[in-house]
Structures are given as C-alpha cells and as structure tokens.
Image (spheres, helix red, strand yellow):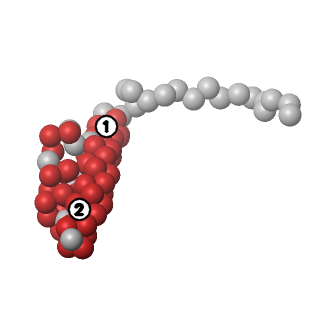
Amino acid sequence: MAVFIIAVVYLVINGIIAYHMKNVAYSKGYDDDASAWAMSFWLGIPGWLYVLALPDLVARKNQEIIIELLTNGNNNTIEVIEQDELPEL
C-alpha cells in the first residue's frame, strides 16, 4: 500500500512540474504542441533539462529585428527631438 501512495505522489508532483515546464516552453516562444509537457512528464529530470535548454525563440526574433534595423541604417529609427533647455523641476 505504501508503494502505491508513493507512486501516486510521485506522479502528481511530476505532473505539476511538467505543467510548469510547459509554461516555460510557451514563454520561450514554443506552441502548446511542442511536447514539453509529455517530455517533462515521461522523462522526468532529463525532460526538465531538455525544456530548460530549449533556445529562446522570442529573444531570437527580437535580436533579428534589431540586426535588421541596424543593417538598414537610419530608415526606421526613432527621431530624437533635441531641446535647447531642460524643463524646470
């Protein structure tokens, strides 16, 4: 009976951690069907490490936009309005 209780507790804790790993994968830019939950649940610690090691697609997209803006020159930059005087505090 104790083995059954330990197995149920392990599966519940593993399911909760797998749910959080799915949220981590989603915040990194992966869709819900990225299998992060299944890999985390069935593989355990190696699955968690896999999800943590996934590259961040959101940061990659932002870096590509920045590189594109820098290579295009000043075409899409924000103009800074220069003022002669600073406002009074």
Query: In this orientation, does residue 82 appear?
Result: yes
Name the side, left or right, on which 7 lies relative to 58.
left
36 in relation to 77, above or below: below
Position of residue 74 measured from the top left corner of the image (x, y, whole percent): 40, 31
Position of residue 60 measured from the top left corner of the image (x, y, whole percent): 27, 46
Mark identifier at residue 65: 1
Label 1's element?
A: helix
Q: How many labels, in total?
A: 2
Residue at the image position 44 percent from the left and 30 percent from the top: 77
Instruction: Identify the amino acid type marked 2.
Output: Val
Q: How crowded is mark 2: few (under 14 residues within 10 Å), some or many (20 or more)?
A: few
Q: Residue furthest front?
A: 1
Q: How crowded is mark 1: few (under 14 residues within 10 Å), some or many (20 or more)?
A: few
Q: In which quarter of the image is residue 67?
A: top left
Position of residue 41 measured from the top left corner of the image (x, y, whole percent): 18, 57
Residue at the image position 25 percent from the left and 70 percent from the top: 6
Instruction: Identify the amino acid type marked 1.
Output: Ile
In front: label 1 or label 2: 2
Of 17 and 85, nearer the camera is 17
Which quadrant is the C terminus positioned in? top right
Query: In this orientation, does residue 10 appear?
Result: no
11 in relation to 3, above or below: above
Q: In which quarter of the image is residue 50?
A: bottom left
Mark identifier at residue 8: 2
52 in relation to 68, above or below: below
Mark identifier at residue 48: none
Asked if labels 2 and 1 touch by Cβ distance under 8 angstroms, the answer is: no
Position of residue 57 measured from the top left corner of the image (x, y, whole percent): 25, 45
